[in-house]
Image (cartoon, rainbow, N blue to C red):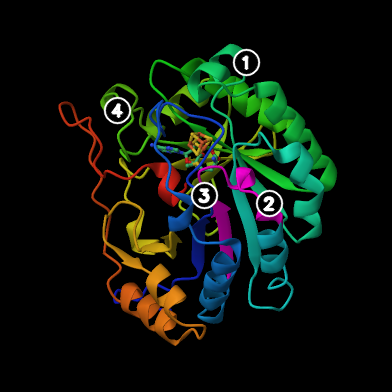
Amino acid sequence: MIDPLGRHISYLRVSVTDRCDFRCTYCMAEDMTFLPKSDVLTLEELERLCSAFIAKGIRKIRLTGGEPLVRRGVNDLIKSLGKHLNGGGLDELTLTTNGSQLEKHADALFDYGVRRLNVSIDTLDSDKFTEITRGGKLAQVKAGLAAASRAGLNIKINTVALKDFNEDQFSGLLGWCGEQGYDITFIETMPLGDIGGDRTTQYLPVTEVRHILEKDWTLTDCDHNTGGPSRYTDVLETGKRVGFISPLSHNFCATCNRVRVTCTGKLFMCLGQDDNADLRAPLRASEGDEALNAAIEEAIGRKPKAHEFIIEPGNGGPALSRHMSMTGG
Ligand code: SAM
Ligand code: SF4
């Protein structure tokens, strides 16, 4: 699939559920209304949708959410998608998870062909962790991480940079990741969804994160690329990498290779734009994939040039009404 600007679309992110066992303050409001089950694609429908994308040239799939591992039966989906690996069209199947359910899923994930995971941790202080996730337990996530490492999964930690909340944690997180053998990526907050507060108070540019880290660590730019939007540097002292995702202060749209589908079958051609295409109707209209394929092609034909995020004083509300948990990270 090639969009009108010549970008090859090879990476699909699939939000398998909008539900989550955490309520991270930058991601969700405290009282979230989740989608009625009837709106959500069944696991069989999600598999059919992913297979159609693979047939059209998608080489990498990332399952996300909400929390992908709280969806009942998600293992069956991962198992079927794993069959597309090893010559079946897919180069990589991976997940972004909060890690709370990882302990019981780690071995199966490895067996089904998953080799890398992104796990989100914003602080190593247990009390602060519970505060930012509104109830999450750091010890449970650490147990999940240990199980994942034992199973042979490579781990990258995702940390959202939050002003006046976790600046004092950055250096320690980097050191801890070095000890554990994890890479780490710092992410700027994106203005997605009403969280019941002003986001400008949370926004901290990753240039500032790098500045803070460089007081303790030697970072050198490198050209490591995982097909995602992170820019990486090598950490001399740990031998691991640190990545920075800066959708607001640095625009990465020119090399964008991805599209996202929600658990209701809406295809978003850009994380930072509201335009989307409904794939659920063509999926449910017939058993054959003709209508579905036509809808996908039509949508790729209108992938926008760039996102439209802005965070500035006095403009701290959501740029887009949908939450991050709808389209995933
Ligand atoms: N529940 C899983 C998790 O937390 O990893 C997967 C879904 S979560 C929406 C994916 C990633 O998006 C997480 O790393 C999370 O920290 C990040 N995220 C959520 N809301 C965000 C926001 N408003 N700005 C930037 N990153 C956000
Ligand atoms: Fe849940 Fe992930 Fe959003 Fe946190 S960031 S509330 S873990 S979906």
Range shown magenta: 59-75
**Is residue 188 on the magenta stretch?**
no
Location of the N terminus by quadrant is bottom left
Mark 3 vs mark 2: give the one in front. Answer: 3
Q: Amino acid at mark 4?
A: Arg
Q: Nearer the viewer, residue 228 or 121?
A: 121
* Secondary element type, mark 1: helix
Mark 4 vs mark 3: give the one in front. Answer: 3
Q: Is residue 36 above or below residue 7?
A: above
* Upstream in sequence: badge 1 or badge 2: 2
Q: Which x, y percent locates residue 18?
A: 47, 46
* Secondary element type, mark 3: loop
Q: Which x, y percent locates residue 179?
A: 74, 29
Q: Amino acid at mark 1?
A: Ser
User: Which residue is label 1 attached to?
Assistant: 126
User: Which residue is label 3 attached to?
Assistant: 17
Q: Residues within 10 Å of mark 1 (few under 14, many from 20)?
A: few
User: Which residue is label 2 attached to?
Assistant: 116
Q: Nearer the viewer, residue 117 or 111?
A: 111
Whether residue 26 appears in this view of the structure is: yes
* Secondary element type, mark 2: strand
Mark 1 vs mark 3: give the one in front. Answer: 3
* Upstream in sequence: badge 4 or badge 3: 3
